[in-house]
Image (spheres, helix red, strand yellow):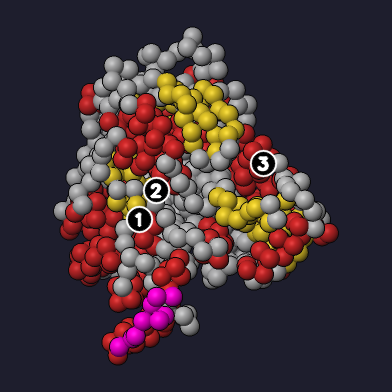
Amino acid sequence: MARENDDYGHDLGNDFTEEDSPTYGGDRWAEGGFGRDTEDDRDPDGDTEDDRDPDGDTDRAADTDDANDGDEADDGEDRSDAAARGADDERDAPVDAQEAVIAAVLDEIRGSGDPDVVPAQSTVAGYAEFLAVDAALDRRWPESVMEPSLDRMQALCDALGDPQRGYPIVHLTGTNGKTSTSRMVDALLTEIGLRTGRYTSPHLQRATERINLDNRPVTPERYVAAYREVEPLVELVDAKRGDGPALSKFEVLTGMAFAAFSDAPVEAAVIEVGLGGRWDATNVADAHVAVVLPVGLDHAEYLGDDITDIAREKAGIIKEGSVAVLAAQDRKVAEILLERCAEVGAQVAREGAEFGVVEREIAVGGQRLELQGLSGRYDEIFLPLHGEHQASNAAVALAAAEALVGAGTAQPLDPDAVRAAFASVRSPGRLEPVEGGPDRPTVLLDAAHNPAGAQALAGALGTEFRFTRLVGVIGVLEGKDARGILEGLQPALHEVVVTTNSSPRAMDPDALGALAAEVFGSERVSVEPSLAEALEQAREIAEEAGGSGVGVVVTGSVVTVGEARALFGKEPE
């Protein structure tokens, strides 16, 4: 249900030319724009993880979306101990027979000896049902697997009454930066007064993070309600599949999100691709605005190792009559994306030509920006996220929001609303500080899980922090380019502690340690299979330097970072 071009009131680029700023030039866009000479200078998430990584968006770095902000596929486990705040009250309360049974079921589902894992806003019974639903979804075809067909997903949407056609959509793809950018778009649309829905993957700690209403994750009870709504129709579609596979976990989750947004109802939805683009379950929706963040190599087992083939897959979200908002790209990628736009008659807005970052200044707790949007310039923007890749993500998000609401030079967005939106953005697991003080090392979490994300993370650590000693805690999933990740991080880290996580796909720490020794040298590498112990060891190594300026960064996988967040008592968000 793509909107016609004339539904958008802005004229892309007519009022923003090279004369406005010598740093902007359309001919530079395909090479990175704004003075970037190589694609390596720019994080392809920041969302770090590409499409739904079996490791977990992300996010252009780990978003350095994302969780390299959105790509490592979830292993189905709730990695949060965030309910600990309410645990003491529950521990002391009398438990009747029914509650005892529920607690036992919860204990069995979760595999934990402590039932005090219930979020503050949920009941024990409600949370137990949520975990049971999550376990049922995990028994389906894993979301780290992709089949080139939208037939099953379209059949489910048909049965649901095509809820995805009931609201305008911003659809995001790219190798990194999706989740962070999705959060920014959501914040902008919320601040200007729209009721929003946001669907991202993977999650860091709890599956409820994937489906957001009003810029907040749904409750476990709302998640269960969404599943119960689609469950009979899922069974109907599965029954008609013949010899083909049943609906996958990701397909069911996507149907849940579409239905929840329709029921709310929302006035706009921000949808992140899981894996690729053309054959991703989310692509049954026709985006009003299609966003393509930097495209690089990842998920080679499904997308191939030719960047032009990957670009063609991701270009599949650009539909007839849509507006394509394109981040700076490698020239070959740029050509493919523009060919797709011409093929379907999509309007084009390019970073470095029609929009972009005019100025960027590092600030305490983030950065100050001046952005050129499609409708004008916006200055005095504070973005509480670190890294040049996040500034680029912000420019893309601004253009996407403007395109969706039809903002143009005659009617730009309210500058104060833009400032308030960006100032409110949170992107957990993307260069996120979780500990630090005069007598303690600064601890950062970043879900970089591919080489591009690792390079972006290393760049941000070098330019925006002044560590005298920085120790990495690294846990990677099998199937990822572990050597590429380590090589990307090597310039920024003095020493590394190699570890693992609870995923069945976690790389063996000894094997990862052997790789790390080849990249860093054996004298700079330690191996500690327990993540908690690895964190403690990294703190001790950092503290050996004495004084201030010492730090620890946890990275390598969305799962690793999600579990580290839980260890630090962080709430899912």
Counting residues from the N terminus, which is met first, the one under dot 1 or under dot 2? 1
Residue 224 on image: x %, y %: 28, 67
Quarter of the image with the C terminus in it? bottom left
Q: Secondary structure at mark 1?
A: strand
Residues drawn in magenta: 88-96
Q: Is residue 280 magenta?
A: no
User: Can residue 329 be spotted in the picture?
Assistant: no
Residue tagged 2: 273
Q: Return the residue at label 3.
A: 465
Mark 1 = which residue?
217
Give the residue displayed 46% in from the left and 80% down from the top: 114
Q: Nearer the viewer, mark 1 or mark 2?
A: 1
- Distance of label 3 from label 2 (alpha carbons): 32 Å
**Which x, y percent locates residue 253?**
32, 60
Side (left or right) of 297 relative to 124:
right
- Rendered image: mark on residue 106: none
Q: What's the residue at 42%, 24% (across, down)?
A: 378
Q: Which residue: 33% across, 29% down? A: 402
